[in-house]
Amino acid sequence: MMRLAIRVSSASSSGRGHFERCLAIRSYIPEGVFWFVDYESDYIKNKIFKSDKIFYENGKNKFNILKNNLEKYSINCILIDSYVINSKDIHNISNNVPIVVFDDQNTNTIADILICPHPLNYNDTQGKKYLIGPKYAPISNKFSFFEKENSKDKKILISFGAYDSIGITLNVIKSVKKFIEDSKFNLNIIIILGKESPIITQVQHEIRNLSNYKLILDCDKMEKIYKNCDIAIGSPGLSYLERMASGIPSILVSQNKLHDILINKWVDLGCGIKAENSANSIEYALKKLILDDNLHQELILKGKNTVDGKGAERIAKEIINMVSIK
């Protein structure tokens, strides 16, 4: 019987991607799951299955509550999705419980199964199973099986995660505004952020009195947004994988050094267009994607063929199989 514990980053500053991809995997686990998260959150409480238990560590790098409940609940597998928790530390207190770890940065992670849904190269280590590449993109399959809605005016989605602490969203809004002024295109803009983002007031200021701009906070039905959007401008995180499965071509702008590497990889695979965080670069990429129908369709087809919406199910099967063998 599976007794899975998930230790996941859930602090608002960490974004929603860690939690959402664990939630996608959890949907394929038949038994109840034990969640160990950073802090209390209504957003998380409302999303977690009623059959699951949730514990609060009250810290981004803590796992004492997990440690104290391993034997109590006979936990026989731990899934870790956090940039600030060292899997070696949990391995040392886990009583030989197998560990599954998300590793997006090709670090020397201790794990029985290592997951990276990005096109990175890893050096195999004996005794460790690697689930690497977009085949293991842990997104909900709801993003892969719907027909997009047609609209007279093109809709542009701006999505840099729920938090976006460095404010890339603001720079992109200014770039898009300049592009619309210069090109005279009729474009509708949808901006996605979480309610705890520190840049909400600034975004509202930038789009005040502009009827073609809409800011949506804490959207829990992203598939409805994707149905209506033609192009996205964002970073190469979980939302990008969702957009590929949904058939939305993306212009990718980096938020950090890891993104620089990932964007170059995705562009080499023909899955997106790179833009620098500058008005000229974003304008050029937008014009290219809007005017070139062949490129637009190529990116749609490539994205849907690359991310099929079955990655979470594949990961869950590997975890279940590992536990059954051990």
Image (spheres, rainbow, N blue to C red):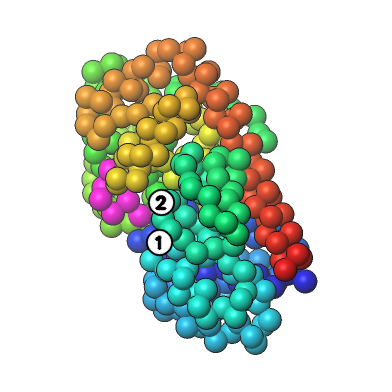
Q: Are marks 1 and 2 in contact (CB under 8 Å)?
A: yes
Q: Which residues are magenta?
A: 163-168
The quadrant of the rendering that contains the C terminus is bottom right
Which of disc 2 and disc 1 is earlier in sequence?
1
Q: Is 128 left, or right, of 217 in this rendering?
A: right
Residue 158 higher or lower than 28, as above or below: above
The residue lying at 40 percent from left, 39 percent from top is 262
The image shows residue 63 at horizontal and vertical percentages of 47, 78
In the picture of the structure, the residue carrying the numbered disc 2 is 105
The image shows residue 240 at horizontal and vertical percentages of 47, 40
The residue lying at 50 percent from left, 64 percent from top is 110
The residue lying at 44 percent from left, 32 percent from top is 266
Q: 178 or 15: nearer the eye?
A: 15
The image shows residue 312 at horizontal and vertical percentages of 63, 50
The image shows residue 321 at horizontal and vertical percentages of 74, 59
In the picture of the structure, the residue carrying the numbered disc 1 is 83
Element marked by disc 1: loop
